């Protein structure tokens, strides 16, 4: 059985503990984890690096909580966060390849969460409207 490359996507600071647990499980499963924790300095724009890495994997694991995440200004007419860009890339079939298998995990919307990591409280990203839209889309 070939080792699977698995891309881990989420916002970072608010979900660091969850990311650590997923990365540990991927190590135990002897998968090749591809995640921002392993990035060294590079010349590419962060979004370009992330999207190329998603395309190099067979499985995409996404974790969503209550932050939409960083929205790059450059080459981003839809004003998507890097996290949503990664998800969309995983949904696209490649040349002679199907879309990636996607495993999505979402924080229960009623779960208490730190205010500083909740766009509805901070007012970021249209006061949480963007993460709500993204979560609703992924839920379908």
Image (cartoon, rainbow, N blue to C red):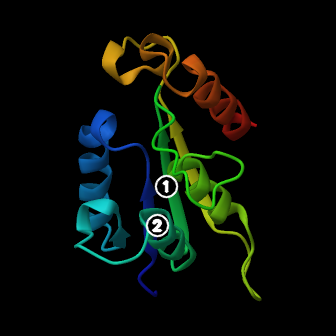
Q: Which mark lies nearer to you, 1 or 2? A: 2
Q: Residue at x 34, y 13 (%)?
A: 115
Residue 4 vs residue 92: left or right? Answer: left
Q: Residue at x 76, y 37 (%)?
A: 140
Task: Compare marks 1 and 2 and give the one earlier in the sequence.
Answer: 2
**Within 10 Å of the Cα at label 1, are there few (<14), some (14-19), or many (20+) other Cα atoms?**
some
Q: Position of residue 98 (x, y in %)?
A: 74, 76
Give the residue at mark 1: 61
Looking at the image, which is closer to me, 103 or 78?
78
Distance, label 1 to label 2, CA atoms, is 13 Å
Q: Is residue 128 above or below residue 51?
A: above
Residue 85 vs residue 123: left or right? Answer: right
Looking at the image, which is closer to me, 68 or 44?
44
**Within 10 Å of the Cα at label 2, are there few (<14), some (14-19), or many (20+) other Cα atoms?**
many
Q: Position of residue 7 (x, y in %)?
A: 45, 65
Callout 1 secondary element: strand
Looking at the image, which is closer to me, 114 or 70?
70
Q: Is residue 132 above or below residue 32?
A: above
Give the residue at mark 2: 50
Callout 2 secondary element: helix
Looking at the image, which is closer to me, 34 or 120?
120
Asked if marks 1 and 2 touch (Cβ < 8 Å), the reply is no
């Amino acid at each position: 059985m070939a080792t699977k490359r698995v891309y881990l996507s989420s916002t970072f600071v608010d979900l660091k503990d969850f990311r650590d647990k997923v990365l540990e499980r991927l190590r135990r499963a002897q998968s090749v984890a591809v995640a921002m924790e392993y990035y060294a300095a590079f010349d590419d724009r962060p979004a370009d690096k992330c999207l190329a890495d998603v395309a190099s994997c067979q499985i995409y694991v996404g974790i969503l909580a209550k932050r939409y995440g960083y929205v790059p200004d450059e080459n981003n007419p839809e004003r998507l966060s890097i996290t949503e860009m990664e998800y969309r890339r995983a949904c696209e079939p490649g040349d002679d390849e199907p879309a990636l298998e996607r495993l999505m995990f979402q924080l229960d919307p009623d779960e208490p969460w730190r205010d500083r990591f909740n766009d509805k409280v901070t007012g970021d990203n249209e006061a949480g409207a963007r993460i709500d839209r993204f979560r609703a889309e992924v839920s379908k």
